[in-house]
Image (cartoon, rainbow, N blue to C red):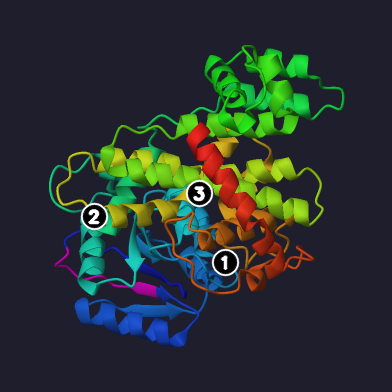
């Protein structure tokens, strides 16, 4: 994906008047030329200058004694990225309120979220329609320079019609960023259990005491311990007996799953199937991550279960926001809304783990699990979850179809010893675990 920056100088806010200067910054000459021609054809009175990278753009901006009135930008630029350029512009007095229009791709979730956080006013999804681009440019140029209303104003639910993906993404990010929906809360018992199990001297009595602090989790643990999967045992009625039957590590997994399941609550029938599918995917990914870690001889395989189980947690908040935005919409394309969820969930997942106070490794995995190709040192935890996430697609536990490629070839070199035979050997165990837990939790 190639990216560009376009800067316009304001003479008057009347769109019929002349604009004396536009600066196009793009390191690829063909794109830079194409942009110049397209904009010049639309606005023949513009005087268009060009720069070959972000540093040259910044130097040009610094040399001027006027404030430019709009910026169209994408992130990847030599020497100074679009993000850094925006940060520098916002730090200057004359650049605080310049409308900033970002150019991005539909699935580039990280760029979209970073853009929102760092001050972007609105954005255009590539490949873009020229008329749509011109409409946004003209809308921003005719607005008074006083804030970031275009994105924030998008938070209200739509009453009629079908939103395009670009507008829907904007509205979803608007209500998440604006705090218009409550962030889900992870039960405190999860943190206390992890703290206990991190000690070498933890005993079942202490663990039971902590679990009993949460009535819902306590009842579920007892119910599982009395299920047909543990037939042959006498009935147990107290948490301590249930933990003894399940074992410390299986109890730990169960607590994570029950807590995770409590977050998958939505009263929107349109997305119930997606929520259930996501929960099953999470269980499968947790089981696969644990099985892979075990096969590779990694320490604490149960920790990998938690990483895999929670890697997609950001989708829950995005789905909740989508539900609010599309509450009264007619002709809703659910599949398109799920594409929006996929495009935004990684950064939102990272945000949730920060809020909850989870260790940085959870934040790192949430942010990067979809693609590790550009990460120099992904770490074995992320590498395992990345492969587990791909592998469960082959098993049918994902809304995405398996592309038929050899996923071992996509694995990080950190996973020494990983091979197709190893993955095949865990398939039955993963499927059995999912079938067991989806009915119990």
The residue that disc 2 covers is 333
Residue 326: assigned label: none
Please state if 142 lies on the left or on the right of 318 as rendered.
left
Q: Which of the pair 146/235 is nearer the observer?
A: 235
Are the residues flagged by discs 1 and 2 in contact, CB closer than 8 Å?
A: no
Inspect this view and state whether residue 347 appears: no
Q: Main SS type for the magenta part?
A: loop
Secondary structure under the numbered disc 3 in the rendered image: helix
How many residues crowd around disc 3 within 10 Å: few (fewer than 14), some, or many (20 or more)? many
**Separation of residues labelled 1 and 3 (CA atoms):** 39 Å
Nearest to N terminus: mark 1 or mark 2 = 1
Q: Report, in whole angstroms, how far the alpha carbon at label 1 lies from the one at label 2.
A: 38 Å
Note whether residue 253 is visible. Answer: yes
**What number is the disc on residue 281?**
3
268 or 205, which lies in front? 205
What's the magenta region? 15-23
Check the image and report above or below for 303 versus 101: above
Seen in the picture, residue 438 relative to 27 is either above or below; the reply is: above
The residue identified by callout 1 is: 80
Looking at the image, is 404 positioned above or below residue 423? below
Q: Position of residue 394 (x, y in %)?
A: 53, 63
The residue lying at 74 percent from left, 52 percent from top is 293
Other-residue count near label 2 (Cα within 10 Å), few / some / many at <14 / 14–19 / ≥20: few
């Amino acid at each position: 994906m190639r990216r560009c920056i376009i800067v316009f100088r304001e003479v008057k806010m009347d769109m019929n008047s002349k604009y004396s200067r536009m600066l196009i910054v793009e390191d690829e000459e063909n794109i830079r030329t194409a942009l110049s021609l397209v904009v010049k054809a639309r606005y023949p009175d513009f005087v268009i200058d060009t720069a070959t990278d972000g540093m040259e753009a910044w130097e040009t901006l610094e040399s001027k004694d006027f404030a430019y009135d709009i910026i169209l930008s994408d992130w990847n630029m030599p020497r100074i990225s679009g993000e850094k350029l925006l940060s520098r512009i916002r730090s200057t007095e004359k650049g605080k309120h310049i409308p900033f229009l970002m150019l991005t791709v539909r699935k580039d979730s990280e760029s979209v979220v970073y853009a929102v956080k760092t001050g972007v006013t609105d954005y255009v999804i590539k490949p873009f329609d020229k008329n749509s681009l011109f409409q946004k440019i003209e809308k921003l140029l005719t607005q008074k320079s006083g804030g970031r209303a275009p994105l924030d104003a998008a938070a209200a639910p739509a009453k009629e019609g079908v939103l395009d993906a670009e507008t829907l993404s904007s509205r979803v990010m608007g209500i998440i960023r604006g705090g218009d929906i409550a962030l889900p809360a992870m039960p405190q018992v999860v943190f206390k259990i992890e703290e206990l199990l991190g000690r070498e001297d933890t005993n079942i009595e202490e663990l039971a005491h902590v679990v009993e602090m949460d009535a819902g989790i306590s009842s579920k643990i007892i119910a599982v311990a009395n299920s047909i999967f543990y037939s042959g045992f006498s009935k147990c009625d107290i948490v301590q007996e249930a933990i003894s039957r399940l074992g410390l590590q299986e109890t730990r997994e169960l607590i994570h799953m029950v807590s995770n399941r409590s977050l998958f609550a939505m009263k929107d029938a349109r997305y119930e199937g997606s929520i259930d599918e996501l929960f099953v995917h999470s269980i499968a990914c947790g089981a696969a991550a644990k099985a892979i870690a075990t096969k590779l001889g990694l320490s604490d395989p149960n920790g990998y279960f938690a990483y895999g189980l929670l890697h997609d947690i950001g989708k829950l908040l995005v789905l909740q926001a989508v539900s609010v935005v599309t509450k009264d919409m007619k002709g809703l394309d659910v599949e398109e809304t799920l594409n929006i969820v996929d495009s935004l969930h990684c950064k939102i997942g990272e945000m949730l783990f920060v809020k909850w106070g989870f260790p940085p490794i959870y934040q790192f995995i949430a942010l990067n699990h979809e693609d590790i190709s550009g990460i120099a040192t992904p770490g074995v935890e992320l590498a395992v979850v990345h492969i587990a996430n791909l592998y469960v697609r082959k098993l049918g536990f994902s809304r995405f179809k398996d592309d038929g490629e050899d996923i071992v070839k996509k694995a990080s070199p950190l996973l020494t010893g990983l091979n197709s035979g190893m993955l095949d050997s865990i398939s039955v165990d993963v499927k059995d675990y999912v079938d067991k837990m989806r009915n119990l939790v």
